[in-house]
Every structure is written in C-alpha cells, then in structure tokens.
Amino acid sequence: MSDQTSSTNQGPQDLDNLRSSIGRLDEELLKIFAERRKLSLAVAANKLTSNKKVRDQAQEKNLLTNLTNKGQDLGIDPSVTLSLFHNIIEDSVRSQYDFFLENSSAESLEPLRLAVLGEADSYSHIAAQQHFATKKRRFVPEHCSSFLSIFKSIESKDANIGIVPIENTTAGNITEVYDLLLQYKLHIVGEEKLKVKHCLVAPKGASLDTIKDIYSHPQAIAQCKSFFNQHPDINSHFRSSTSSALKLVTEYQNPSIAAIASEQAAENSGLEVLSYGINNYQENYTRFLLIAKQSIEVPSAIPAKTTITLQTEQKPGALLDCLQVFKSHGINMTKLESRPIPTKPWQELFYIDFEGNPSDLMIEKAIIELKQTASEVSVLGTYPMHDILATKLDHHALSNQFNHI
Amino acid sequence: MTAPNQTINNTNINRLDLLLTPEALKIKVPLTEKAANTVINGRASIQNILDGKDDRILVISGPCSIHDIDSAKEYAQRLKKQHDELSDKLFIVMRTYFEKPRTNVGWKGLINDPNLDGSNDMNLGLSKARELLAWIAELGLPTATEALDPVTPQYIADLISWSAVGARTTESQTHREMASGLSMPVGFKNSTDGSLTAAVNAIISAQSPHTFIGIDNGGNTALLHTNGNPYSHIILRGGKRPNYDAKSVSACISNLIDANINPRIIIDASHGNSSKDFTKQPVVAKDVMSQIKAGNSTIKGIMLESHLIEGNQKLSSNLAYGQSITDSCIGWEDTQNLLQSL
C-alpha cells in the first residue's frame, strides 16, 4: 500500500492505481463500520439487561477527547474528527434506541404496511426510508393521494402505520394534519426530521436563461420563494405532488419548463438537475409524525416526547395557568400550536409537544395537574425523540487542542 | 354595467361536465409491465411487417364496434389462442373499436355512450375502454382501434398497437395532424366513393411534422409539435366497387409510387370490399392471400369484422350476447376456419 500512496509519479496509470487503493480503503472502512455497529448493538443488549440508559454522555466525552487527540497525532484536524464521529455516534445511539424499542414490545417482524403521501421518492417516502434505516422492521409503502386517505387507510386497518408532515422550518405548520389528528383520534408513535433540499430539474439543454415556468407542490414553491423573487420572469405553477410535476416536465421536453423536486426524485427522473438546494434557507427541515391506531410505550431508557391537546376555559389567564404547570415541573415544551374548534366558534384548541414520558412519575403528576387546570386534556401519544444531540467537548479541552495547530 | 357574454357565448351549449384527466385515468388503470410489453412487441412486429423485415401477414380481426365488455373479453380469449397457434404465419391483432363515425346520427361507440342509452357518460366510457384495453394487453394480445376523436388518444393510446383513420375522416386536417403524432402505425382508408387521392395526401401529411392544439397528460391545453409518423400507410376498403382485386391493388401501388410513398397496403375485407355483405369477407380474404402467395409483397395485412355471433342486431333493451350492434360481422366459427386457412 505504501508503495502506491507514497508514489510521486504523475500519470493516468498512477491515478487509476491511486483511485483503486482508495476504493479498497473505503471498503475496509465500511466493513469496520458494520463491525462497529454489531458491537454497539451488543452494548445495547448489555445495557438492556443491566437496566442502564442508552446514552452515557461522560463516556462519549471521553471517547471523543481520546479520538481527537489521536487524530491530531495523525494530522487530522479535531473538527474533522468530531464531525466524522458525531455521525457515527448518532447512528449508534439511534440503533440502540431502536433495539430497546423492538425488545420492549412483542412485535412481529412482518413488514409494516405504511401509508405515505405521493409516489416513490416523495419527501414523505424519503422520510420513511430514513426513519426505518436503523430499524430491524421493514415497511411496504402504500402510496396515498391525500392526507385524508392516509388517515382513512389507518382507520380501516389497510395500513398499520402512516407518516405525515406536520411542520416545516420555512413554510410553517401543515394545519390540515393537525385537524385530521383530532378528527381521527389516531396516536402519534414516532417522529422524523428530514433536511429538505429542493432541486431544480429540467430537460437536457435547459438553463436558468431558458426556463420560464416551474411546476411543483405548493409547499415546495413556498420554500423556494426567494428563488422566484430573484427570477421575476419565471412563473410558478402548482401541481398535486412533486412527482406529478416531474411527469409534466418529462412529457413536455421543453427547455422553458422545469420542476422542483427532492434530490432523490430528481436524480431518478432521467432529467437534468440544474441546481441543488434552491430553498430559501439551506437549513430547511420538515418534521414528520408517524401515526397508528395503537399507542406505544417508550422504554424509560430512551428520551421521549409527548404530544397532548388541551382546551382551556374562557377566562383570563387560563392558558397561562396551564403553561405554569410545565414550568413548575421543569418540563421543556418544544411546541405550542393553536387551532380553531369548528364546533365552538372563537374557542381554541392547543397542541403541545414536550420532552418527557408519562411513565415518569413527574410527567404523570404534571398531566394530572393539567387535567385539573384545563377543561379538557388528551394525550395523542408518547414517542422516541428524534433529535440526538451531539455531545460537546469542553471548550477548554478543545481550545487546548487547537492551540497546538 | 351588464355582462353581455351570456347572450353571445355558448348559446348552443346546454351544459359542461368535468372530465377526468388522462393522468387521473392512468393512475386508476395503470399500464402494467406485462401490458407494456404487449404494446412494445405489438408495435415492433407491425413496424417490421410494414418494413418487410417480417414476412408474416398482419390480421386485424374483431367486432365492428365494442358495446359489451364481457363478450369482448371472451372474443379476446378465443383470438389469443389463434394468435399463439398461427404466430409463424400470421400476426393477429384484435380490432377494438370504441368510436364510431355515423352517417348522420346514432350510437357513437362505447367511449361516447357506454350505457347505450344516450346518457353519454364519457367519464365512464373512457374508464371502461381503458380497462378493457389493459385487460387484453395483460392477456398478451395487441389491439387496434380507430382514432376518431383527437383528444381520446391521451387517455388510451399507450395500450394500442395500431390505429386506423376512417374513410370519412381521412381528408380531415385534424386527423392527419393527430396521426403525425401517434406512437403506433396508422392506416388511412380510401374515400367512401373509392378514390385514393385523399388517403395518399393523408399519408404525405401524416408523415410530416405538424403543430396543433391538443391536451397534455394533466388535461391542460397545450401546443403539440409532432415529428411525423413514418408508419402511415393506406387501407383499401372498397368504394362504389370493391378494390381488393389484383388490378385495383396494382393501380394503388402506382398511385403511391407516383406520390413518392413506399407502397404498403392493408386490405379491409369488409365495407365496400364485401359490398356490405358480411358473408363475402372470407372470399375477399382468400383472394388477397392468393395475391400475396403469387408474390405481391406490398400487401401487408387484412382486416376482418368478426364477432362471436354472426350478423348484427338493432340496439334495444334486450340484446343478444356476442353480436354486433353496428355493422354485420362473420361469426366465430367462420373466423376461426378462415384464420386457419390463410
């Protein structure tokens, strides 16, 4: 190996050799990563029998400090080591969470029938793939044409589970889903966050100068508003889904017509991707909920989130009294959303997401207190929290390391 | 200010109905992989026959018009057996005609009036037509149809291997433009009086590019730019006199060569060629076969009007199963005997 990598000869033959050496190393890395995953699951099994929490941040901190030091000896910048291992640790923690979840319920391993909006490569479908990537259980997608048909198909047990977008960091809430959640009384059994990267797709030969009309789903167009502001001569048109927009562009084969779709859909469409990530903000996320007829129990070793709805009495400070309950129990509220109640004009229903698991005595107490304060409280579900926050190294330790450079 | 539009626009339009889009119908009745293979192979075989790369004779056989799905499926199953059994000599395609041009008024076909009662439920008609075409394609039997309405191909053409433009519409610019953009080979029939001029001009026109207004898959109006259809050819259907005989065929060949068209002919054994007597179809078909055997390689195929039960019946509330409600057809037994003898 050292013969090839240390070679200073330049030429196409050498480049090929170098590339194949890198390819071999990459395969080694993959094998080692798979081996590490297995060990990580063995650790999860051990933690499960010894009743320990999945996450041990002190241990992670030691591991990262050790690695950044060793990396530096090998000439690797600590920031590179950190970002590499944050990804590895995230996968490991997620796999361990899923191991705990799968072992806490007597689930069969038969694939789940999952109701999902749009066709293959829709954003919902990609989010589902991401969600199940670390899980043993597989899923078979049932493609639905509307949010309503997703809820109906779970209600009628055609599907075991569904995935629906609930909010986007640029375009806001998907209110229709909130209303359906209340109407269908299904349970939230999981959440997923997807980084959305909208791509501009057009037939061969098209460029930003030739494009006059762009088709996509209204949400995608809303999330790319700055692009349209920068190109006032380009018109936007709504389609029922991004896949329908791609079909139109494929049919027209016209350099003046383009679509906005996910990276995965764009690359599978056979069309040309003119631009990756034309969304207003590069940090653009959509949060999805997994919904089912039956609620789940989340093992206490896993950080959980709970979603409730509450109605307050029509008196001054009623909402404040409810929120006070969260404060007094030190519960972190992650979302508060209000929706009108169609049968009660001018009254509001509040959706609240908070960190915690009702199996925890403190949370249970808080919910009891809320029920005394609010006129109506119902729990929509408790589910594993999606975010796996990266363990941070001490400022001190890091700055010491950087000083060496 | 009053809007005068009400008295100027749509004065002879009674009402409008919303029609489902081609896209919506294709989601409802998708093109499966097996059906797609039937169409791809069907079109390729017909193109090879027209190009002379495949020596088999194209036979287009089926009811004058489809009015009943069950009898059409039974006919398809029987024809599929012949298609397989005779595949070394013949390439058999089922005639599945959903649109009928009428001399004045009358039932205009399954797409236009699937309930056969003048209710004209075209949403249902398009669905029924597409479902049947998909079913026959799944069976592995290619289909042929008449392209009459210039919009309907968007809904069903992906399931069809060959199309005809009828004697009454061969002269129409709209139909020539449509044919220039169709994905399958298209035959133009000679005029009802027997003259070939309109069909020869239609072939020249359909082989050239055109630009015209149509709809896209989503149902929006669109400007269609076509490449021209290289597989446009003539169909001899007879006129005041039959024109299937060797003398008429040779006159047709000269006509095509004079117009710089590669002579490729399909002969319709029915209509003017059978002098509207369905029992004469086997006589015509056998004569055409003898011309082919005698060495005429410009004759590429034969069309038959055939159903389960021979003859035809008037449209009524008490219809006999498997018999045509438009032109008379030969019955199944005669059809099978004829196919076996070709």
Image (cartoon, rainbow, N blue to C red):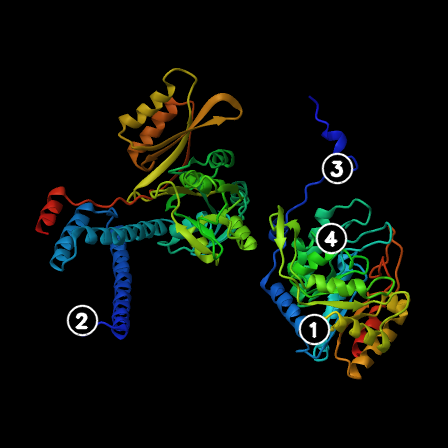
Of the numbered discs in the image, which one, if any, rests on residue B15? 3
The residue identified by callout 1 is: B50
Look at the image and tell me whether residue A290 can be seen: yes
Q: Residue furthest front?
A: B258
Neighbour class for label 2 at 10 Å: few (<14), some, many (≥20)? few
**First of labels 1, 3 by sequence position:** 3
Question: Disc 1 to disc 2, how far (Cα)?
Answer: 63 Å
- Check if mark 1's residue and mark 2's residue have beta carbons within 8 Å: no
Badge 1, how many Cα within 10 Å: few under 14, some, many 20+?
many
Give the letter of the chain under mark 2. Answer: A
Q: CA distance from mark 4 to mark 3?
A: 20 Å
Q: Which residue is label 2 attached to?
A: A8
SS of the residue under disc 3: loop
The chain that hosts pointer 1 is B
**Residue B211 point in image, percent of width and height:** 64, 54
Residue A50 horizontal/vertical position (percent): 23, 50
Amino acid type at mark 4? Asp
Q: Which mark is residue A138?
A: none
State if disc 3 and disc 2 touch (CB < 8 Å).
no
| Secondary structure of the residue carrying numbered label 2 | loop
Q: Determine the CA span between mark 2 and mark 3.
A: 81 Å
User: Residue furthest toward the top?
Assistant: A316
- Where is residue B256 drawn, in percent x and y? 76, 71
Residue linked to disc 4? B149
- For badge 1, the amino acid type reads Leu
- Asked whether the viewer can see residue B132, the reply is no
